[in-house]
Amino acid sequence: MCSSTFGDDMWSCRGAGLSRVLSAIRLRAGPTVKLALENSKEGNVKAQRTARTVEAEEAARLKAQAKKDCCWRNCRRTSSG
């Protein structure tokens, strides 16, 4: 991550390439720049953790939808008969 051109916000520069990161550093409006570096192994662990979180959220959403659908079907059976 690299600090933004103005202010203290940090922006991801993953996959941007060295020339773009160096350009961002040169364009800074001020004498300082902040960089947050990460180990490639840490990045892989973070990506796996994110993937597991997304899978868990999707499973929870599907479970809630199935429960809602089941309840809806039961309500229709009792009201139509």
Image: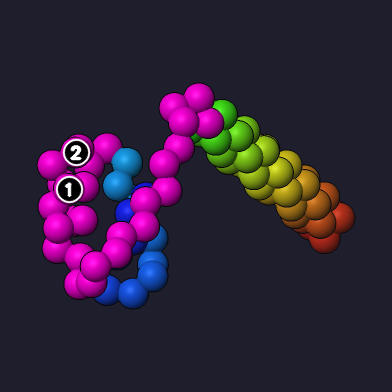
Question: Any magenta on residue 66?
Answer: no
* Residue span colored magenta: 15-42
Q: Residue at x 70, y 44 (%)?
A: 60
Per the rendering, the mark at residue 2 is: none
Gap between marks 1 and 2, in whole Å? 6 Å
Please rate how many residues cluster around mark 2, counting C-alpha atoms within 10 Å: few if below 14, some from 14 to 19, many from 20: few
Q: Quadrant of residue 25?
A: bottom left
Residue at numbered disc 1: 22
Q: State the SS at label 2.
A: helix
Question: Any magenta on residue 33?
Answer: yes
Q: Residue at x 38, y 70 (%)?
A: 8
Q: Quadrant of residue 2?
A: bottom left
Q: Which colour assignment does the render follow?
A: rainbow
Residue at numbered disc 2: 18
For this rendering, which residue is in front, 17 or 31? Answer: 31
Badge 1 amino acid: Leu
In the picture, which quadrant includes the C terminus? bottom right
Q: Position of residue 49 (x, y in %)?
A: 60, 34
